[in-house]
Amino acid sequence: MKIDQHKVKELLSREQRGAAADELRREANVFFVGGNLPERETLETLFESHYQENASLFHLSFGEPDDFGSGANLARLIKKNFNAHLLGRLDYPATAAVLERAYVAGVDILDLPLGPGALEQVDARLSALEQARAIFPRWAVASTLVAGAEPTTLTRKKIDLLLEREVIPLLTLDRSAAITPEESSELFHYLTVAWRRSKALLKPLLPLIYLTSPLAPASARTGLRGFIDLIEGRRLLATSDLRRVLRVKEVEESFASSGL
């Protein structure tokens, strides 16, 4: 993985479109799906685009807490109809019960942004991330940080703290960043070194990383490399789905033994 200096300047010159709960769009091989969208029309659009060219990742934004049920229904439909990883984004410190529902609905990877501010100001989100770690598989919880939204020294501390807890820090960049191209490159270099040191599992997230950051593959993907990546991606997805089935079965058996 390398830092594309041209892309650093490009990202700093334009506003990055964030994920919204009422929007459906595709960028490269990532589908951004709003959790508040109508199910039938959304599914039809997804089918039409996906089968013209397969998407590698579905990014589902759940929206406000009161709208969680709508997003959970869309998660089930996506997992039922498409063979790709599903990332679910919650922009609030959800309870353990909500996190469990997201996982059971089909979310493979959870993104709960930590947000800017001192560590004591984001304590509730850190607690929610800890709860998510107890529910989701190892390296299946992420937290998005925004480069330049706070001093880079604080962002580095958050990167280290998240990785210590086996949460994958993701870093985005756009023109709102109060940061120079040189500082951006240094920060993303720090992130890639930290990922390698922690041996974080990034493969399912690479389509999103390459789309929202200046990071790019270190070399062009050959036909053989692409085939190997495809097989590995399917293995990771099958493992994730099997773990979810076993967890749901365990919960159901626990309820049955309790007479619930």
Image (tube, grey):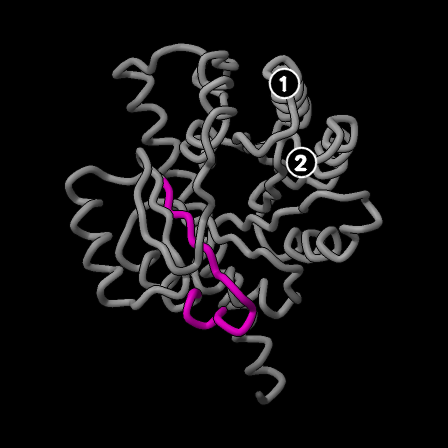
Q: Residue at x 30, y 59 (%)?
A: 80
Q: Which residues are magenta?
A: 57-71
Q: Is residue 190 above or below residue 173?
A: above
Residue 177, image quadrant: top right
Q: Residues within 10 Å of mark 2 (few under 14, many from 20)?
A: some
Q: Is residue 179 above or below residue 27?
A: above
Q: Residue at x 73, y 27 (%)?
A: 152
Residue where numbered disc 1 is placed: 180
Q: Residue at x 26, y 56 (%)?
A: 81
Callout 2 secondary element: loop
Q: Residue at x 67, y 46 (%)?
A: 115
Q: Is residue 233 left or right of residue 223?
A: right
Callout 1 secondary element: loop
**Upstream in the sequence, badge 1 or badge 2?**
2
Given the image, on which type of amino acid does mark 2 rest? Ala
Q: Position of residue 222 (x, y in %)?
A: 29, 13
Q: Is residue 138 left or right of residue 31?
A: right
**Residue 149 marker:** 2
Q: Position of residue 205 (x, y in %)?
A: 47, 36
